[in-house]
Image (spheres, rainbow, N blue to C red):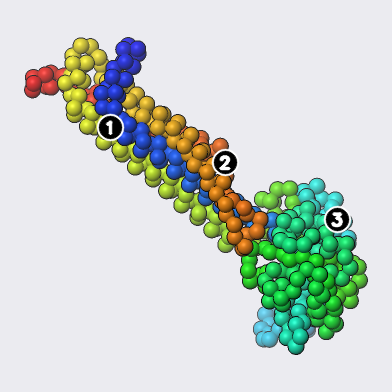
């Protein structure tokens, strides 16, 4: 194959219709640019939304669920042990909400090499007392340092200092919604009533905002010691053990293992947030479908331009074949034209896509619902640029394949005789 000569002919044909070539290249450039910008933004959005859940959710949560006993007294009576007994209105067992041997469980978890960190927790219902009005609320008793390390607690404290919860006795960090309902400021004292009817006064040292307005209207945070004091429990009392592991994919299997080992309930993050993961998958799928559709549309543009070029260059193709160029040579000429458009348009699209992504990343995104987010989220994963490059070349190749095949089969005798 006369490679140098054929390359020269390809360039000549490419420049002969430079306006149409430019339009085709712009189509590829636009498609690649939007493909990268769309996927980068949607992946960044998914990561942000996942972070709202993952940052505040343990990979495995151990707790003592209050539920009805599996076996009822009648099941132990000889005449009724053979069949199945149908019992109505079964009441839950009178078990306490706290975990038994919580300290021993934590010690065993710390010895597990798969575990990254552990944070004990107490969750209890309370009433916020505002004059003669009582508002239902929830207090989360936390190990402040562990909660900050594993679940970024300090990032969600929008006013005040999170460490004051540890350093100030009988202190509380209120959800922002709850603080607004009670019209309190940092330094004020609020009164709460526990489920046992005991009243306690707590000093407000900060406001917390998770981004979920309904949750922030009821929840608040105290240290473990303060919460144990409110409930009148010992220093070993806890209702939950939050576990973060090194490999989140192992969470379902480890939850089942812990249930069997410790004899308590365990739920993994995938089970607790299955609907959320489905939404993330669908958003990502839509992004890829839209991006690939843009590239296919650009490919049809290249196909149409090459088809028109073949009809206009019938004489030139006939002369080439009459002077000794084979069908493979002609095929190579038009395939190289298509790939040239794809490569040039693709490279420019990669550059513009990165630039557009960087611009989106700098746009301010300030909302009271998401205090930790300052700009629009963007993911700069190299995978998107690699995928865009591959699709750019593949799409333009197939766009040029059929016109090139048609050109390679032209009979020069028929064309020249017709002229």
Q: CA distance from mark 2 to mark 1?
A: 33 Å
Residue bearing mark 3: 108
Residue lying at the far right of the rendered structure? 234
- Judge whether residue 282 can be spotted in this image: yes
Q: Quadrant of residue 308?
A: top left
Quadrant of residue 121 in the image?
bottom right
Which element is circle 2 on?
Answer: loop
Residue at 57%, 41% (x, y): give it.
380
| Count of numbered badges drawn on the protein | 3
Q: CA distance from mark 1 to mark 3?
A: 70 Å
Along the horizontal axis of the image, is 238 left or right of 388? right
Q: Residue furthest left?
A: 418
Looking at the image, residue 416 lies above or below residue 277: above
| Quadrant that contains the N terminus | top left
Q: Residue furthest bottom?
A: 132
> Which residue has dot 1 on it?
20
Residue at 85%, 55% in the rendered image? 108
Could you tell whether 345 is left or right of 206 in the image?
left
Q: Quadrant of the C terminus?
A: top left
The picture places residue 218, in percent across and down from the top left corner, at: 70, 73
Mark 2 neighbour density, 10 Å: few (under 14) some (14–19) many (20 or more): some
* Location of residue 261 in the rendering, given as x and y in whole percent from the top left corner: 80, 60
Sequence-wise, the earlier of marks 3 and 2 is: 3
Q: CA distance from mark 3 to mark 2?
A: 40 Å
On residue 225, the disc is none
Q: Could you tell which of marks 2 and 1 lies nearer the N-terminus?
A: 1
Disc number for residue 380:
2
């Amino acid at each position: 194959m006369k490679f140098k000569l054929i390359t020269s002919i390809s360039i000549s044909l490419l420049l002969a219709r430079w306006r149409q070539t430019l339009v085709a290249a712009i189509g590829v450039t636009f498609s690649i640019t939007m493909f990268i910008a769309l996927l980068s933004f949607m992946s960044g959005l998914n990561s942000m939304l996942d972070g709202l859940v993952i940052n505040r959710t343990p990979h495995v949560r151990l707790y003592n669920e209050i539920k009805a006993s599996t076996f009822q007294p009648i099941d132990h009576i000889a005449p009724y042990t053979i069949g199945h007994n149908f019992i109505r209105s079964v009441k839950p067992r009178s078990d306490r909400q706290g975990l038994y041997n919580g300290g021993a469980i934590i010690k065993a978890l710390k010895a597990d090499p798969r575990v990254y960190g552990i944070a004990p927790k107490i969750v209890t219902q309370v009433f916020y007392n505002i004059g003669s009005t009582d508002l239902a609320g929830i207090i989360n008793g936390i190990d402040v340092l562990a909660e900050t390390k594993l679940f970024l607690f300090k990032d969600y404290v929008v006013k005040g200092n999170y460490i004051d919860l540890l350093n100030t006795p009988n202190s509380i960090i209120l959800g922002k919604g709850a603080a607004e309902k009670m019209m309190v400021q940092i330094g004020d004292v609020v009164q709460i009533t526990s489920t046992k009817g005991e009243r306690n006064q707590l000093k407000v040292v900060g406001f917390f905002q998770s981004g979920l307005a309904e949750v922030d209207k009821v929840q608040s945070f105290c240290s473990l010691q303060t919460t144990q004091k409110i409930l009148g429990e010992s220093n070993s009392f806890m209702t939950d053990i939050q576990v973060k592991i090194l490999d989140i994919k192992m969470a379902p299997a480890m939850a089942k293992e812990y249930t069997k080992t410790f004899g308590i309930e365990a739920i993994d993050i995938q089970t607790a947030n299955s609907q959320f993961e489905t939404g993330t998958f669908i958003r990502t799928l839509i992004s890829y479908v839209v991006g690939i559709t843009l590239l296919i549309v650009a490919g049809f543009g290249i196909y149409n331009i090459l088809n028109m070029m073949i009809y206009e260059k019938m004489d030139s193709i006939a002369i080439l074949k009459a002077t000794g160029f084979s069908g493979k040579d002609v095929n190579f000429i038009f395939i190289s034209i298509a790939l040239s458009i794809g490569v040039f348009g693709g490279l420019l699209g990669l550059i513009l896509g990165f630039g557009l992504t960087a611009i989106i990343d700098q746009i301010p995104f300030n909302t009271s619902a998401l205090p930790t987010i300052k700009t629009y989220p963007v993911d700069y994963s190299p995978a998107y640029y690699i995928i865009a490059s591959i699709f750019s070349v593949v799409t333009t190749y197939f766009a040029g394949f059929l016109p090139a095949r048609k050109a390679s089969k032209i009979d020069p005798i028929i064309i020249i005789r017709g002229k």
